[in-house]
Each structure stands twice: as C-alpha cells, then as structure tokens.
Amino acid sequence: MPDSPFLPEASAFVLRNARVPAAFLTDGVPAGALLDAEGCAAIDIVIADGRFGPLRPAGSSPQELPAADLAGRQAWPRLVDGHTHLDKGHTVARTPNPDGDFAGARDATSADRTRYWDAEDLRRRMAFGLACAWAHGTGAIRTHLDSQESGPEGGSQRDQAATSWGVFREMREAWAGRITLQGVGLTPIDAYATDYGRRLADLIADSDGLIGGVTRPTGGLHGGALAEIDALLDRLFGLARDRNLDVDLHVDETGDPAATSLDAVARATLRHGYEGRVTCGHCCSLALQPEAQATATIARVKQAGIRIVTLPTVNMYLQDRQRGRTPRWRGVAPVQELMAAGIPVAVAGDNCRDAFYAYGDHDMLDTIRAAVRILHLDHPLAGAPALAGPVPAAMMGLPHAGTIREGAPADLILLPARSLNEVVARAHADRLVLVAGRPVAARVPAYEALTGETAPW
C-alpha cells in the first residue's frame, strides 16, 4: 500500500470533504450533508483514538483538529466477504480442472484434498489468502471448510474435518484484530444422516462455527429434486437446534430448473422455527424456473427470513459451461427480484484460484465492481455498495463491519475516485487501507510465497 504523508500523525484528526455512499451510513446521512446524483454524501469524518467520531456535513468539522483533505474522493469502509473457501484457494496450478465445469471442479477438488490437504498445506494457503484480503481492504470473512469424512491418504486415514477446523481456529486467532473470521462446515447433505454428521456438528459447535453443507448427495451434482431432501434437512436442522448453530447452505448451484432445494430449505426453516438464522448461497436454478414457481419460492424465502448470497464471478464462470459452446446465460440467481421482495442479498467472492474458479485475488472491491456489471446493479448505482458492506455484515452478526458510523473502528478504504462510476470503472490498485485510523503497510503477497520461493523483486 502507498505511504500516506497527507494523513496527520495525531490521535484525533479529520478527513475533510470525503464522499461516502449513503449505503454505508447505516445510522443515516448527517443532517445537512449534500447528496450527489449517485447517492453519495459529502461529509467530514472525525477519527479519534482509532474510532469514528462525529460525522458532519463537509466543511463543518472542528477547525482546531488536524486534517487531511480528500477533495471529494470516495471513502468506503473495509468490505465484508460473506462466502468464500479459504481452504480450497490457490490449488489450480497443481490440480487443474480440465474442462472448467462443475463436475470437473468437484473431482479435481476431491483429488487435491486427498493428496495434499495436511495442516501445513492448509496453513500456507489460508495465510496467503488472508494476506491478500488484508492488503485489499477486507475486514471480515466467512469461509466454508470442506468437512468430508476421513479418506485414504498413502494407506492411512486423515481426519480432514479435524485438520481443517484446527487450522481454521489457528488462523482465526492469529488474524484477530485484523480480519474477523467465521467458519462453516461444508459437506454433502446426506452426511448428516450418518453418525459422522453428528460428530461433525459437535466439531462445528466446539469451533464456534455454523452448520452447513451442499444440497446434493455425496459424489453427485446439483440438479433435479433430491427425493430425501426433506428428511435430510430435518436431520440437519435438528443437529443445529440441539447445538444452537446457525445454518449456511450451498443451494441449487445448477442451471437445471428442476432443482428446487431452495424451496425445501425455506419450508424446513419454517418447520423448525429457524426464521432469520439461515443463509443460502448460489440459488442459480431459481432464475430459470417458471415465473409463478419462482415467485412462490421467493415469497416463502421472505417468510422464512432467509438471507441470500450471490457469487456472480464464480457462477458466471461455472454455469452453462460446455466445451466448444458459448454459454447462453449468466448463471446467477435472480438478485433483483429477491431484493424487490425485501430479502437481504449479499455479494461475495466464493472460490479463488481453484478448480471451481481459476481466478481471483480475495479482493471484495473487485468482486463488487464485477457484480455491478454482471447483475445490472446500476442505473442507479446507489444501492450496490451495501451488498459488500452492511448487508453481509448483518448476516454475520457484525454491527460495526462494512459501515461508517460513530463509535465504530475507523477502518476505511480511501479510493482515488470521486464517483461510484469511477469506482466501478478502474481497479484502484492505489487504494489506501486504514485500520483503526492508521494506514496498513501491506502489499499483496508474491505468488512465490505459496511455494516457499523468493520473489525476484
């Protein structure tokens, strides 16, 4: 990150003439502050002892405080990634997906996990991903952790769930104060019908995690209607209730309109009285179902208080992929219809340089910029920033994350952009990240760190 000689060294100072999207001002726009045509407020931000002080209309902050003038440039909070896979990240070079499709991703991930995923390998790759996120300005991450039952490795057995969750707990402690981490158990849903599912639920509870999974059977793909889905969901919700665990599921990650697990999850949520405690990611098939069916499912999702996470870059990469054929749809959930129904929808990064998505850099600013274009979250742009800030923060139960509000930690991303259009138009490698009011002296790690090599510069 660049040096910031313009920032005062004092423990209390003002960022004058900041331009902040109103979507990040969860306590409201300061009275008298002017809003531009894109819904951004011109304000002065007081920072004292590492926290936000009063927010005032631009030009009205105390003159006696040292100040830095942002001259109308954008100030964002650190962003929130509510759905990623730190344990899978940065494996694409050693175990590629030959066709780039979902089946290839499943098989390549299984092979890579069986061959490589010991504690040292997980620790190195997860630390790399977190260092990228830290440098880019991500303040909170919820990561799903592959938690399949033990499999063979060199003639022995490795308890993958115990290994992965053990490393996750290490990372959560090591990164405390820099990035807030949450973990979700990820396994095919039929695992919860076995005694292993009960043991996994205990491990998740002992690790202060969330119970989760994918609404497809072991070795299978999303698609069609899973005959046992209601009984399997009842088992999962029962395990969750007995341990007071929230639920986060991968749902209907397919272009098959016959995949209706989202509706089944909504019904199960209502059946078990779990309203407001369930998050569902992907939900791609909902976009291809008949309008009346999709509308009824959306109404049930709203009634159940389910939160939706859309993963636009990864779903556009995976869905409708066939070798030699151009895809016919973007692969994403019907986000605008969900939001119109009053359902909280967040954008998240999902996979990063693994078999499910060959690209990415754990950069939520890049993700929200891509989401605007993929999901048509523009015209107007005003509401888009919330999908990477206060909305996922609320899903994660983090009231101060992803917002700019008095009393919260003064964590910011200062951007060399004056408008939301300029934010979306450019990658902004020259952004400045502040944590507790001070600049973060961090650069994204060199790729050589993944292999123990030394970078040439």
Image: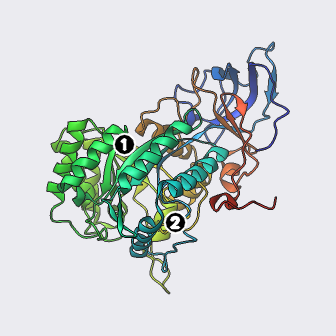
Task: Answer with the quarter of the image where residue 42 lies.
Answer: top right
| Residue 453 pos. (x, y %) | 71, 62
Q: Earlier in the sequence, mark 1 or mark 2?
A: 1
Kind of residue sitting beneath label 2: Asp
Q: Residue at x 82, y 58 (%)?
A: 457
Q: Residues within 10 Å of mark 1 (few under 14, many from 20)?
A: few
Left or right: where does residue 437 sit relative to residue 110?
right
Disc 2 is placed on an element classified as: loop
43 to 205, vertically: above or below: above
Q: Which mark is residue 342?
A: 1
Query: Going by the image, does 50 lie left or right of 118?
Result: right
Q: Is residue 261 above or below residue 343?
A: below
Question: In percent of the image, x 48 and y 60: which residue is there?
Answer: 88
Q: Quadrant of residue 281?
A: bottom left
State the image coordinates of residue 268 (x, y, percent, origin top left): 19, 48
Residue farthest to the bottom? 324
350 left or right, relative to 264: right
**Amino acid bearing label 1:** Gly
Q: Nearer the viewer, mark 1 or mark 2?
A: 2
User: Which quadrant of the figure contains the N terminus?
Assistant: top right
Q: Do the residues under discs 1 and 2 have CB atoms within 8 angstroms?
A: no
Q: Depth check: give the residue in front, 91 or 417.
A: 91
Q: How many marks?
A: 2
Residue annotated with mark 2: 354
